[in-house]
Amino acid sequence: MISDLKLESDDVKELMQSRWQFNIELQKVDIVKDDEGYNGKFVSLEKIQEITNAIMIPLGLMIEQTTVCADGSEYLITTLHHVPSGQFRRSIGWLFKEESGMASKTAEEFGGILTYKQRYQWRCILGVGRGEDAAKMKPRNQQPPSKPAQQLTVGKLAPMSPDHQRELRKILKDDQEAIDKLCNMSGGKQLGDLADSSFESIKKGAIKLAAVWDI
């Protein structure tokens, strides 16, 4: 059972010491966005793995990603190992229900969901920033303050009201990954970027997204 999996070993002291050293070494690395999607350039899963593995291996760190089916759903399990000590820390993320099947989604879409979650869990378990607004990926606790929301310019549409933003957050149960996904789908980096005049269509997208993510 997924619920029975331990999220970390009884002792993580040595693992966290290596993680701290990882943070220091990461600051020395320049990151170039190497892939492009419908909402601009981003750092691909392959690039993140290449850069972080080069730092982790000398520190005795290793990431393992596996999928498992339980209770009719598929899950992604990302485990950060400290090989010399055997200590570990684990992240578990839901992917999709088996019953949704190929009748409603293509294999390509399933692959996209898996890659998306792999990239986010890989970064999350290392505390690596998203890298969308800077040339360097930084640990989360060392990222610069966020910039003011960039308003959409198409048709000079009014930005989404705070009430509508709160409604979308409630639909998605304040799940930040789901909110980010909705923003990407709707042409913005955060909810404040989105146009209020298209709220109803964005709301429909949020409801569909909530169903897919089972939140």
Image: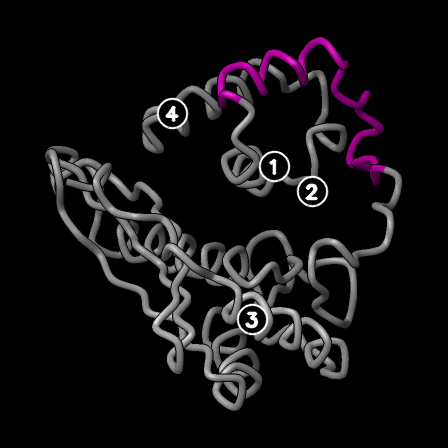
Find residue 183 and name its label: 1
Residue type, numbered disc 4: Ile
Query: Which quadrant of the figure has residue 55?
Result: bottom right
Of the numbered discs 4 and 3, the one sitting upstream in the chain is: 3
Residue type, numbered disc 1: Cys
Residue type, numbered disc 2: Lys
**Element type at mark 3:** strand
Of 128 and 33, nearer the camera is: 128
Q: Residue at horizontal 30%, vertical 55%?
A: 77
Task: Tell me whether circle 3 and circle 1 mark residues in contact (CB < 8 Å).
Answer: no
Q: Residue at horizontal 55%, vertical 78%?
A: 52
Q: Which portion, as a residue range, is magenta? A: 149-173
Task: Tell me whether circle 2 and circle 1 mark residues in contact (CB < 8 Å).
Answer: yes
**Element type at mark 1:** helix
Q: Which circle, 4 or 1, is nearer the viewer?
A: 4
Residue 181 spot, x, y in % from top left: 52, 40
Residue 89 spot, x, y in % from top left: 41, 58
Residue 21 spot, x, y in % from top left: 66, 77
Find residue 35 and name its label: 3
How packed mark 4 is, by other alpha carbons closer than 10 Å (few <14, some 14-19, many 20 or more), is some
Residue at numbered disc 2: 189
How packed mark 2 is, by other alpha carbons closer than 10 Å (few <14, some 14-19, many 20 or more), is many
Q: Residue at horizontal 45%, vertical 55%?
A: 121
Task: Tell me whether circle 2 and circle 4 mark residues in contact (CB < 8 Å).
Answer: no
Q: Residue furthest top?
A: 163
